[in-house]
Amino acid sequence: MKNLSIPPSADAVIPEGGIDPFGWLVRKGEMAQRMRTFDWASTELGAPASWPAGLKASVNLCLASGYPMYVWWGPSLINIYNDAYVPIAGPLKHPRCFGRPAEETWPEIWPVLEGFVDEVRRTGQSVWREELLMPVQRNGHREDAYFTFSFNPVPGDDGSFQGVACICHEVTSRILAERNLKVAHFETELARKELHSFLMQAPIGIAILSGSQHEYTFLNPRFVSLLFAGRPAEEFLHRTVREVFPEMKGQGFFEILDDVYRTGRPFIGAKVAASIKQADGVERSMYINFTYQARRDTHGRIDGILAVIYEVTDQVNEQKEFELLASNLRSALVARDEFLGVASHELNTPLTSLKLQMQIAKRLYDRQGRDGLSEERLHKLINGTLFQLDRLGHLVGDMLDVSRINSGKLSMNLVYSDISALVAETLERLHGQIDAGGGGLHLSLAPGLHT
């Protein structure tokens, strides 16, 4: 058989006879070195050379294991552990607990550990526990640690129970990571539900289109009521936008979606005219504001489009009505200015005629007294004056009624006029002025000349 002994270290305690008491120890490492330098004779285990074969084998197995492991031996369950167990013991216990009774090592959890040892002693069977919570103190403060371990019986040379060999694995990091992951999953799911609730209650239409063919994978109620009035959302989920809206071909919406998906550039449309076929087959015209925003996956790749839409038909119609009203108002203002220009001219005409007639009458009176105004001439003068005053009254009553102009109640109608009578009337008004100037005028008109 191959000799597994190793040369003793410089710190090993070797008796005068030169025989290494740890000749049976086949491992190197920190704890193997401590094994060689520890004063075992002062413990109930005694000199290592006289240790039972079961203890030597268990210690060799322990020190050789890459897994955290310890051996508790004897009535006081003296503690021997390997290098992998050092982080579990922590700076508060290592190396102080090496070679000491197990109860001194873990006083804070000893009632639990003692129960496992008693069970192994009583049954002779291993005790297995998985992810067991242990509140330990190993770094100067209490902390919750989780362990998976197996307590295994180790017999002495006579076959009776003498100790336990424990293989243990601390799973605290994994347990805490899983717990944090569950919390993260819970918070993520809560956020997802809150976002879903927000999207479902949003007063604007929201849809998610996935893939290059723009397949509907989410539709909120407002989007459905706006574009699919009278039809259930399930009828359109997992169908492409071209399948759902064939009537929109040629309106430019499909091409815009393709461009946003290809380039990642968002598109914002304002007051866009659209025609949508309703459940009854009738196409409805509307105006909409909408946004197409590229959606990206965790790697930054575009995998869909977020569509936001809301109807502005009422607003557009109101704006058109306002613009029409403003146009009508501008036209009314132009008409008013034109009307006032005409009214000014029409008012000045009878006033000028009245002033002229009064000037002629005064001049005749100043020159000839009452003899200068014959009865016929006075009669014509009075009738002409009354005519002009009556005409002026009509103009004041009909043409300067601003409220009738603003309300649109005043209208001007084109009618046929007798040119011959109009010319004769004009000359009659000027007759006195012509006579006063010593002039003469002969009028020859065809009767009934109209325009």
Image: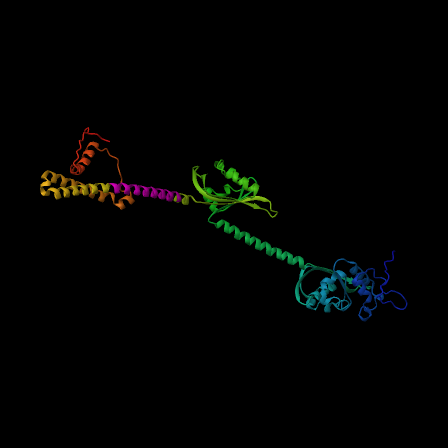
> Residue 113, how many percent across, how many down?
70, 65
The reply to whether residue 366 is visible in this rendering is yes
Quadrant of the rendered image containing residue 4: bottom right
Q: Is residue 373 magenta?
A: no
> Residue 431, how many percent across, how many down?
16, 36
Q: Which residues are magenta?
A: 319-345
Q: Residue at x 58, y 55 (%)?
A: 186
| Residue 441 in the image: above or below residue 350 | above
Kindly give the residue lying farthest to the right in the view shown: 17
Q: Quadrant of the C terminus?
A: top left
Q: Main secondary structure of the magenta part?
A: helix
The reply to whether residue 123 is visible in this rendering is no
Is 408 positioned to the left or the right of 425 in the image? Answer: right
Pick whichever, 265 or 308, lies toward us: 265
Quadrant of the rendered image containing residue 76: bottom right
Is 46 positioned to the left or the right of 180 in the image? Answer: right
Q: Is residue 331 magenta?
A: yes
